[in-house]
Image (cartoon, rainbow, N blue to C red):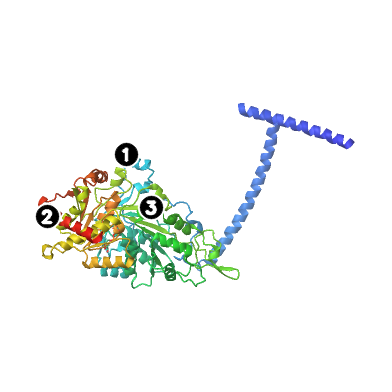
Amino acid sequence: MGSSSKERKSDKTTASTKSKKSKTKEKEASDDELSTPKKSTKSKKRKADEDETKEKKHKKEKKHKEEKTDKKDKKEKKDKTHKKDKKPKKSKDDVPAEDELTETAPEPPAMPEPAPVDGLLRFPDFSRQHLLSGESALEAARMGIPHWLAHPATVDRNATAPVADPRFALSPHAIACCEKAGISTLFAVQAAVIPVLRTAHTLSRLRRHVRDLCVSAPTGSGKTLAFVLPIVEKLRQRLVVRLRALVVLPTKDLAHQVKECFDFFCAGTDLRVGLATGDVSLAKEQAALTDQSSNLAGGSSLVDILVCTPGRLMDHLTLTTNFTLQHLEFWVMDEADRLLGETYQDWLPKVQSFIEAPVSPNALTTTGDIPIPDACTSRDPESKLDLLACPPPRIQKLLFSATLTQDPAKIARLKLVRPLYISITDEGKKDQGATTGSTATYTFPSTLTEHYASCPVDEKPLWLIYLLWEQRISGGVCFTKSLETAHRLAQVVQTWATSVPDDAWLGAKIVVAEYSSDLPAAERARIMRLFKQGAINLLICSDLIARGMDVDQIASVINYDVPTHMSQYTHRVGRTARAGRQGSAYTLVGSTQMFHFKKMMTECQHWDGCLNLIKPRKDLLETLRTQYMTALETVDEIYN
Ligand SMILES: Nc1ncnc2c1ncn2[C@@H]1O[C@H](COP(=O)(O)OP(=O)(O)OP(=O)(O)O)[C@@H](O)[C@H]1O
C-alpha cells in the first residue's frame, strides 16, 4: 500500500514537473510566434556548455577522419606506384557503368554536334531554320503535337550524294551491291537517314546516340533502301544468328517486296532473312524461323532479319517455340501510319510488351541450378540472370511513310526515345501540313503530272475508255473503291478492248487484268509477272496495291473512284513517277464529287496549278460511246 502511495506521489510530482515544463514550452512557443526568443541566462549557459561539448566531439571526429584519409591516400599512392606500368589501356570493349546504359537512365543532354573529323562519321546537318513560328507553333501545341513532331528536320529532295561518299561509310560489299542494282547516287532520304543510323551504331557502344527515327518522304523516293542498307551493314558483322531486325509491313505483297530487297543486299554475306506472311502454313514458317528442337530458348533463331505482317508476327510471338524478340536491335515499321492504324489482335501493344518484358526465367534452360541464358543479355536491366552483365542493345524504332501521321496519340503508343523526325520536302513547301493544321504533310514526286476530268457519275466507264484511248495509256493501274467495281469494270474494259480491231490501235493494244485480294497468291504473282513483261498493260484493282508497291512499268495511275482522303490519293498516284521516272495520274471526278475533291486538294495546298483539267473531244467521246454501249451489252450477255 505504502509503496503504491509513494508511487502515486512520485507520479503526481513527475506529472506536475511535466506539466510545468510543457507550460514553459507552450509559453516559449507562444513567445516565439510573436517575437524573437529571449533566452534566460541559465539556458544560455546550458547552451554554451552543450556547444563546447559538441565542438570537442566534432574536432575529435575530424582528426580521426583526417588520419584515416591520410592512411588511405598513402596506401593508394603506394598501389599506384606499384601498378603504374601494369595498368591496362581502356579497351573499346570495356563494359560501361550500368546506370549509364539502362533506358531508365536520365535523359542525356542534347547531343552535341560532333566536329567534322575526317574518317569519322558526321551527323547530317539538318536544317532547323524553318521552325514553326507564331500561329503555326501555337496551333501545333494546341493540337498536342509534340515539339519534335511539329518541327521535322527537313531535307531537300535534291540533296543526293554519291554512294561512295565517306559520310555513309559503306563497305565495299554494299557499294558493289548498289553498283549491281544500278545505283550510283543515294537519294535524299537515303543520304539523310543512312549517316544517322551508321553513326549511331559505329560511334556509340553505349548506344547513347541511338535515337528513334520517323521518316517522311514522298512515294518512290527510296525509303526501303534507307533502312535496308544500314541494317545489313550493321548486322553483317554479327557472329551468331539472332533475330536482330524486325521489319513489319501492312500487306503480304509489300513484305515480299522488302524481303527481295534484303535478299539482294544480303547476298554474299552470311545473314539470313526470313519471311512471315502466312503464305505458307504456320508449321512451315516456324520451321524456317527457329530451331524447334534446341533447348537454348530464344537462342535458336534461324534468321537475323524477319520481314513480316502484323498478323503472322502475333502468331509467332504466341505460338512459336524459341521465337523471341530479346535480341532485337532494329524494329522497322514501313508504311508506319497504316500500321499504327492497324488494330489486328492489338498487335502494337503486344509487340511492345514482348520487347519490354524481362526474359522469363522459364525461357531459360538450366544445368543443375545454374540458368543458361540463350545469350548474354536479357531485356531486364535488373535481371540477376544477366550473367555477363552486358546491357542489351536498345531497340531502335524506325518509322517510314510517305504520309506519316502527326497524330500525337498514335505516335505516343510507340514510346519513342529521343525521336528525330526527318522529312524530305520540296524547298519552299516546308511545314506545309503543320501550317494547314492537317495531320500529315504531303509531298509528291516532282516527276509526276496530275490531271483530272469532271464527268457525269453514270458515264465514268466511258470516260475511262476515253482516257485509255486518247492518252494512249499503257502500263497503267486503275484504282476503284471496291472489289465489285474492279471486277465489273475489268470485264467491260476488256470486252471493249477486244472489240477494237488490232490495226486501230496506234500504240499497244490494251490487255486488262483484274488484280484483287480475292485471287490466290500464286495467281496474283502470275498476273504481276505478266504485267512486268508487258503482256498485261492495265491492272484494275481496289486499293490492294495502292501502297508501297514498286513496279517500274507503271507509267500511269487512274483514280476511277475519287480517293476519300489525301493520304489515299498520295499513295495511289505514287505508284507512278518513282525513282525520278516520269509518270501521270488521272482522277475521274463525278460531278457530284467535285466539291469534295476540290476541298480536299485545296486544304492540302494541292489544287491551284497542281492539276490539269482534261476537256474531252466531243466527237471522239461519241464514237467511243457507241463502242462502250456494245461492250456493255456483250458483258451482260456473257456474264449475267
Ligand atoms: N539511290 C537510288 N538510285 C536509283 N534508284 C533507286 C535508288 N534508291 C531506290 N531506288 C529505286 O527507287 C524505287 C522506289 O524505291 P522504294 O520502293 O524504296 O520507294 P519508297 O519511298 O518506299 O516508296 P513508297 O512510299 O511508295 O513505298 C525502287 O525501284 C528502287 O529500286
Does the CB distance between marks 1 and 2 fall below 8 Å?
A: no
Position of residue 375 in the picture relative to residue 131 (left or right)? right
Is there any visible trace of residue 532 in the rendered image? yes
| Quadrant, the C terminus | bottom left
Q: Which residue lies furthest to the left in this view?
A: 619
Looking at the rendered structure, the secondary structure element under dot 1 is: helix
- Mark 3 to mark 2 CA distance (whole Å): 46 Å
How packed is label 3: few (under 14 Cα within 10 Å), some, or many (20 or more)? Answer: few
Q: Distance between the residues labelled 1 and 2?
A: 55 Å
Q: Return the mark for residue 341.
A: 3
Earlier in the chain: of badge 1 and badge 3, it is 1
Percent of width and height locating residue 271:
38, 70
Q: Mark 2 points at which residue?
A: 623
Q: Please indicate, yes or no, whether residue 35 appears anywhere in the rendered image.
A: no
Q: What residue type is labelled 2?
A: Thr
Disc 1 marks which amino acid?
Answer: Glu
Number of numbered discs = 3
Question: Where is ligand 1, by quadrant?
Answer: bottom left
Q: Which of marks 1 and 2 is nearer the N terminus?
A: 1
Q: Which of marks 3 and 2 is in front?
A: 2
Could you say which quadrant of the image residue 43 lies in? top right
Which badge, 3 or 2, comes first in the chain's sequence? 3
Q: Where is residue 109 in the image (x, y as percent from the top left)?
A: 42, 51
Instruction: Give the labeled residue for mark 1.
Output: 135
Q: Tell me the mark number nearer the camera, choosing from 1 and 3.
A: 3
Question: Crowding at label 1, few (<14), some or many (≥20) Cα neighbours within 10 Å?
Answer: few
Q: Badge 2, how many Cα within 10 Å: few under 14, some, many 20+? A: few
